[in-house]
Amino acid sequence: MRLVIQVKRAARLLFPVVFLYSCLFGRCYWYNLFCVFRKMCAIVTKRSTGAVNRMGSKPVFVGLINQGATCYLNTLLQTWFMTPEVKCHIGSLKSDVPFVLELQSLYEKLESREEMFLWTNELTSSLSLNVFKQCDIEECFRNLINKLNVEVDQGHKILKLYQITMVQSMKCSGCTNLVEDDTFFLDIPLPICSDTSSENVGHLETALQAFLKEDTMESDHKCYCDHCRTKTKTKIRYYFKHLPQILTFQLKRFEVVGNWMYYQKCHDCITIPLALEFNKSQDNCSKWCLKPTMDKEYNAFNNHQSQNIGRGQPSIQAVVFQEEDPGEADRTVGHDAVRKPVAAQDQSQQNSTEETERKYELFAIWHHSGEYGSGHYYAEIKSVDDGNWYCFNDQIVEKKKKQVSQSSKTAYLIMYRKID
């Protein structure tokens, strides 16, 4: 109680000083004053609620404080911390880049577990982030990986952990000429609603099978054939050439509505399998095929829904964070951005010719609650240490009483780890 009184007295002293300073220099420093009060309140809260455990016991995992609209960043940072391959790689980086140093410092504090929750002010400052502007978490995920890859990691190690190599196969219907090109993804965008009906996909495997199925490009969508020297009807499809350590899928919950050119969120429920399996094709040793694990009756019931599902655009966007206007209003989430491919060198050659099957287990789900243009991000992550699932919701970290739910209306990005 005495500490609270002291904070109030300090506030009365700070107010006229900041007000006079802003009048003299013609600038507004109310945000700085707000930051001071926020840190004071955090200290008072910790001491009054026992956030720093007086008994000496440490929390299992440490939370991260939301600075305003940084739930997307907190979710990403906690997932990387809970992914041993990524955490070890970031800790081993030898760099004097400010955001890398701040990231390493933050992870050291998370590892020490001296406090129940931590601030991320230094990291967001080094990234020049507007903490009151919410960003799409999938875009932040691509931005940070490419920022690490371009500015620090010349060995492309973090990129190789996530990068998926797919082959885009295009066959002309006129001359039957076949053209195959490698295409790179950090995450596979999967539609969860049909383009021509209101029926939802219902299952992750159904959406993935729809993404991999062959489509015919005709009418206004014909492709140019170098051999025919004209636009022809073309059959196009994708298949997996290289599967990474961390296999990631994005559920396309934010879509343009008709011809009105505005976005809305899809709240359809989707079933998420706890494991995925892939086998090498007997006809093509460079092709990985999804091994269906769904219940046969469920698969037959939903098979007709996958016929009209569109496919996302391939590639990866390499964008560096830039300083935002603090006065700019919060933008939307889930906006489809143009992605430019960034390839890790000779990645596809790392596949073992003797390896004929791969299995992946579910270990992280990023959720988005709310509507397009607003909402909140949080994560469910499986610990590799004890095998339990935990919910990371900013400064609150809770152990889930039961196994993660396989059906979700809020799941936005899903991660699988390869089982060695």
Image (cartoon, helix red, strand yellow):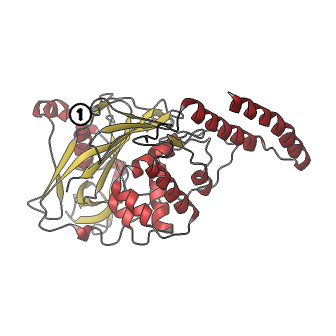
Q: Residue at x 13, y 34 (%)?
A: 295
Decide: is 293 above or below 179: above
Compared across the picture, whether 388 is left or right of 102 comes to left
Decide: is 85 above or below 199: below
Quarter occupied by residue 170 = bottom left
The quadrant of the rendering that contains the C terminus is bottom left
Q: Residue at x 54, y 39 (%)?
A: 332
State the SS at label 1.
helix
**Is there any visible trace of residue 174 in the rendered image?**
yes
Residue 281: % across, % down: 12, 58
Quarter occupied by residue 292 = top left
**Amino acid type indicated by mark 1:** Gln
Compared across the picture, whether 63 is left or right of 291 comes to right
Quarter occupied by residue 69 = top right
Residue 401: % across, % down: 31, 29
Decide: is 125 above or below 399: below
Q: Compare residues 242 and 49 and report the one nearer the observer.
A: 49
Q: Residue at x 47, y 45 (%)?
A: 137
Decide: is 288 above or below 366: below
How many marks do you count on the picture? 1
The quadrant of the rendering that contains the N terminus is top right
Near mark 1 (Cα within 10 A), the count class, few <14, some 14-19 or many ≥20, is many
Mark 1 highlights which residue?
305
Residue 132: % across, % down: 62, 41
**Is there any visible trace of residue 335 in the rendered image?**
no
Compared across the picture, whether 129 is left or right of 285 comes to right
Q: Residue furthest right?
A: 24
